[in-house]
């Protein structure tokens, strides 16, 4: 059985999202810099919101370990795509006979590789597609590199 933890219903792969790749790395790097500079000791004197900022930075640096993925509740709780996939009992939208539908088309306006990825999922299957996404991730690919601005 394919592990779908990082496969969204719409067909994105969470592990090539900046939230699980670049953001945790950058938050950790900033936190390390601040630690080296002593901000843990005097930060709140310079910036009254420092404790909250430090807490948020700590949480951001752990996202890769703490994110539950789309299937675990990450993202918009009212996501129409998730609701539809659950109602139709499909593991991923590309498995639906109506793929790509109007919901996917709306999302694809900002995620230009979404429909192409869905077609690839249909062609090679989810297991191979996940391996391909992991290869992209290891090569530094992130959705933000190709996403259109909202």
Image (cartoon, rainbow, N blue to C red):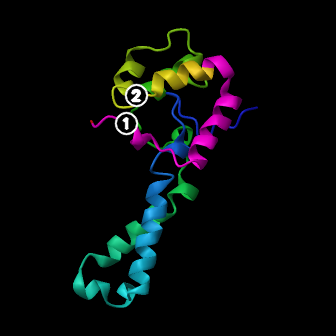
Dominant secondary structure of the residues highlighted in magenta in the image: helix
Q: Quarter of the image holding residue 88?
A: top right
Residue at position x 40%, y 68% from top?
A: 57
Q: Is mark 2 on a helix, strand or loop?
A: loop
Quadrant, the N terminus: top right
Q: Where is residue 62 in the image (x, y as percent from the top left)?
A: 52, 62
Q: Position of residue 85 (x, y in %)?
A: 52, 22
Was residue 134 drawn as part of the magenta stretch in this picture?
yes
Question: Above or below — where is 16 with respect to 60?
Answer: above
Q: What element carries label 1?
A: loop
Residue at position x 46%, y 55% from top?
A: 22
Marks 2 and 1, the one that precedes in the sequence: 2
Residue 104 appears anywhere in the view: yes
- In the rendered structure, which segment of residues is drawn in magenta? 122-149
Residue corresponding to mark 1: 147
Numbered circles on residues, count: 2
Residue corresponding to mark 2: 112
Residue at position x 43%, y 83% from top?
A: 35
């Amino acid at each position: 059985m394919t592990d779908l933890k990082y496969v969204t219903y719409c067909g994105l792969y969470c592990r090539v999202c900046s939230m699980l790749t670049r953001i945790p790395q950058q938050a950790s790097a900033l936190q390390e810099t601040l630690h080296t500079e002593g901000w843990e000791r005097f930060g709140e004197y310079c910036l009254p919101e420092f404790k909250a900022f430090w807490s948020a930075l700590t949480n951001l640096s752990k996202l890769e370990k703490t994110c539950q993925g789309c299937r675990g509740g990450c993202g918009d709780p009212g996501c129409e795509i998730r609701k539809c996939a659950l109602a139709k009992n499909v593991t991923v939208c590309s498995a639906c006979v109506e793929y790509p539908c109007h919901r996917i088309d709306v999302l694809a306006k900002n995620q230009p590789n979404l429909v192409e990825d869905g077609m690839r999922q249909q062609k090679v299957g989810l297991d191979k597609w996940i391996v391909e996404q992991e290869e992209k991730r290891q090569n530094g690919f992130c959705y933000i590199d190709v996403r259109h601005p909202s």
